[in-house]
Amino acid sequence: MAEVIEAVETAPDESKFVRYPDSPFQLYRPYLPAGDQPQAIAGLVEGVRDGLVYQTLLGVTGSG
C-alpha cells in the first residue's frame, strides 16, 4: 500500500527578516555573520557613512 506523506508548508521565520525605514525592501537573513564577516561589514558600513561611492571587499569564500 502506498504511503501518504503530508506536505507541511513552512513560512520563513519572521525574526530572520531585516527591514529598514522608508525602504520597500527587506533582507532575509537566515544566518548570522561569522568569522571575519562582522569586521568586513563594519568596514563597509563605515565607508558608506563616510560617503565612499566605490568600495572593494577583498577576501575568499569557503576557506574553512
Image (cartoon, helix red, strand yellow):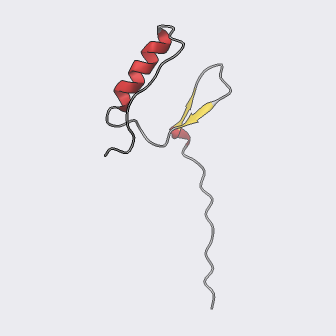
Identify the residue at the far top of this view.
Answer: 50
Q: Position of residue 41 (x, y in %)?
A: 42, 25
Pick the residue in front: 25 or 10: 25
Identify the residue at the far right of this view.
Answer: 24
Q: Position of residue 22 (x, y in %)?
A: 65, 19
Pick the residue in front: 45 or 5: 45
Query: Quadrant of the image for the N terminus?
Result: bottom right
Quarter of the rendering containing residue 23:
top right
Identify the residue at the far bottom of this view.
Answer: 1
- At horizontal 37% and vertical 45% (from top left) the residue drawn is 62
Pick the residue in front: 32 or 15: 32
Residue 9 relative to residue 32: left or right: right
- At horizontal 56% and vertical 41% (from top left) the residue drawn is 14
Figure disc tally: 0
Quarter of the rendering containing residue 9:
bottom right
Quarter of the rendering containing residue 21:
top right
Residue 30 relative to residue 9: left or right: left
Q: Position of residue 32 (x, y in %)?
A: 41, 38
- At horizontal 38% and vertical 37% (from top left) the residue drawn is 60
Q: Position of residue 51 (x, y in %)?
A: 51, 8
Q: Is residue 1 above or below residue 19?
A: below
